[in-house]
Image (tube, rainbow, N blue to C red):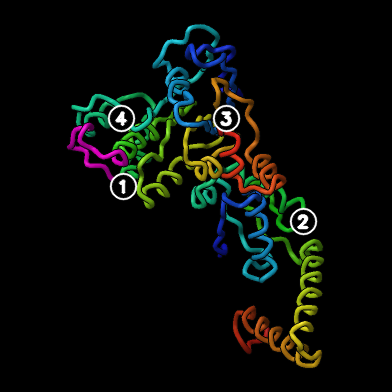
């Protein structure tokens, strides 16, 4: 069942029209060179940026974690958590586990958190929402090794059969682990998505590791 | 008890295939005896930090190969007495290569046979749950 569909979506003057379809149970990884427009694309899918044209269809609910959780820097994490937990579909039990796995200094203003701490806060306020589409913009940015493993496990748990996930990341290892398909955003164009297993096989046929293969695909 | 599965997304081998090979190896080594219960798809996916489709596909492949089976609605279990023909053929090939290497190192066939007998005794001892006890 399609959870998110766009046809001819005009995200940005520098980007071509975007066609994309993600079904419940799928996790689409978006990779691309720095500055390719991954964050702009996700912000548009989330409704944070108004597109210049095209169709965006999302019949269910949606949650978006912006890259580095760039939000009002003066507000402490505890207030973000309180706001998120007041939204419909908040899973309290999962939220408690997420916060235990990814501790955040909640009394500190977001602007005074490190990059890794902001990512933790973003995950802790986004993942517990029982939505049909989850948009995660670099959910591993700045995380220490233990937090990275914890975050991968939490994302894996939330990428269940009832939810569509779009995961933009520069961490290819996480994309290969967590996604069912991958699409390359490069040169102003979102390429067709291909199954993640096919990617590993294609890499093997070219005598490359999957990470080398993705690096080659995203070369400007 | 499920043996530890080590996955490497950096290898040019799809992750579902890496899971399949790990379970095959567990069955071949006796770590996963007939009847052993495999973990649920979602549970294993989270503990391995991979997508649940990857585990589901691995279980499907193992079921198609006759290595695991399940009753309606129950968990997957290691199938009874199933011989993994593909794994056995690979093992035989491996033994051939090993024999050639041993000869190239100047090992005598009688010595080699001694090593083989010793390895078998060791392996049998490790696989018997209660040493010395008759079933």
User: Which callout, 4 or 3, points at the residue further toward the start of the chain?
Assistant: 4
Q: Place residue B24 in its image quadrant.
A: bottom right
The answer to whether marks 4 and 3 mark residues whose Cβ atoms lie closer than 8 Å is no
The residue that label 2 is drawn on is B66
Task: Compute the Cα span from label 4 to label 3.
Answer: 34 Å
Q: Do tags 2 and 4 sit on the same chain?
A: no
- Do residues under tags 2 and 1 come within 8 Å of each other at their CB atoms? no
Q: Which residue is mark 3?
A: A184
**Residue A115 colored in magenta in the image:** yes
Residue bounds of the magenta highlight = A100-117
Crowding at label 4, few (<14), some or many (≥20) Cα neighbours within 10 Å? some
To which residue does mark 4 refer?
Answer: A85
Circle 2 marks a residue in which chain? B
Task: Give the mark nearer the N terminus: 1 vs 3.
Answer: 1
Q: The C terminus of chain A is located in which quarter?
A: top right
Other-residue count near label 1 (Cα within 10 Å), few / some / many at <14 / 14–19 / ≥20: few
Q: Residue furthest front?
A: A220
Q: CA distance from mark 4 to mark 1?
A: 16 Å
- In the image, are marks 1 and 3 on the same chain? yes
Residue pictured at 55% horizontal, 8% vertical: A54
| Lateral position of residue A43 relative to residue B59, left or right | left
Residue A163 visible to an observer of this rendering: no
**Residue drawn at (65%, 40%) of the image:** A199
- Quarter of the image for residue A46 reads top left
* Front tag of 4 and 3: 3
Verify CB contact (< 8 Å) between mark 2 and mark 3: no
Cα distance in 3D space between marks 2 and 3: 38 Å
Judged from the image, the secondary structure of the residue bearing numbered disc 1 is: helix
């Amino acid at each position: 069942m399609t959870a998110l569909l766009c046809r001819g979506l005009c995200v940005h003057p520098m980007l071509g029209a975007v066609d994309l379809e993600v079904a419940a149970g799928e996790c689409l990884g978006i990779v691309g060179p720095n500055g390719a427009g991954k964050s702009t694309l996700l912000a548009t899918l989330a409704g944070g940026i108004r597109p210049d044209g095209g169709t965006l269809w999302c019949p269910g609910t949606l949650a978006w974690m912006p890259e580095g959780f760039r939000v009002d820097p003066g507000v402490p994490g505890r207030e973000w958590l309180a706001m998120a937990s007041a939204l419909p579909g908040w899973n309290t039990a999962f939220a408690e586990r997420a916060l235990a796995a990814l501790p955040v200094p909640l009394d500190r203003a977001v602007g005074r958190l490190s990059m890794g701490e902001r990512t933790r806060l973003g995950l802790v306020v986004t993942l517990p929402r029982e939505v049909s589409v989850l948009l995660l913009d670099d959910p591993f940015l700045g995380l220490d090794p233990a937090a990275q493993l914890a975050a991968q496990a939490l994302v894996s748990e939330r990428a269940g059969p009832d939810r569509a996930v779009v995961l933009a990341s520069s961490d290819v290892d996480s994309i290969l682990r967590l996604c069912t398909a991958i699409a390359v955003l490069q040169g102003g164009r979102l390429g067709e998505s291909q199954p993640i297993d096919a990617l590993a096989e294609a890499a093997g046929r070219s005598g490359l590791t999957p990470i080398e293969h993705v690096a080659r695909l995203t070369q400007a | 008890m499920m043996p530890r599965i080590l996955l490497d997304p950096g290898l040019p081998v799809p992750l579902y295939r890496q899971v399949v090979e790990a379970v095959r190896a567990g069955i071949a080594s006796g770590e996963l005896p007939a009847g052993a219960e495999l973990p649920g798809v979602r549970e294993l996916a989270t503990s391995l930090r991979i997508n649940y489709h990857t585990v589901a596909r691995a279980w499907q492949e193992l079921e198609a190969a006759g290595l695991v089976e399940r009753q309606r609605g129950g968990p997957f279990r290691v199938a009874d007495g199933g011989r993994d023909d593909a794994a056995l053929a690979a093992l035989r090939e491996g033994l051939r290569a090993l024999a050639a290497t041993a000869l190239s190192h100047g090992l005598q066939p009688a010595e080699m046979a001694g090593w083989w007998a010793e390895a078998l005794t060791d392996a049998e001892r490790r696989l018997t749950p209660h040493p010395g006890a008759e079933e």
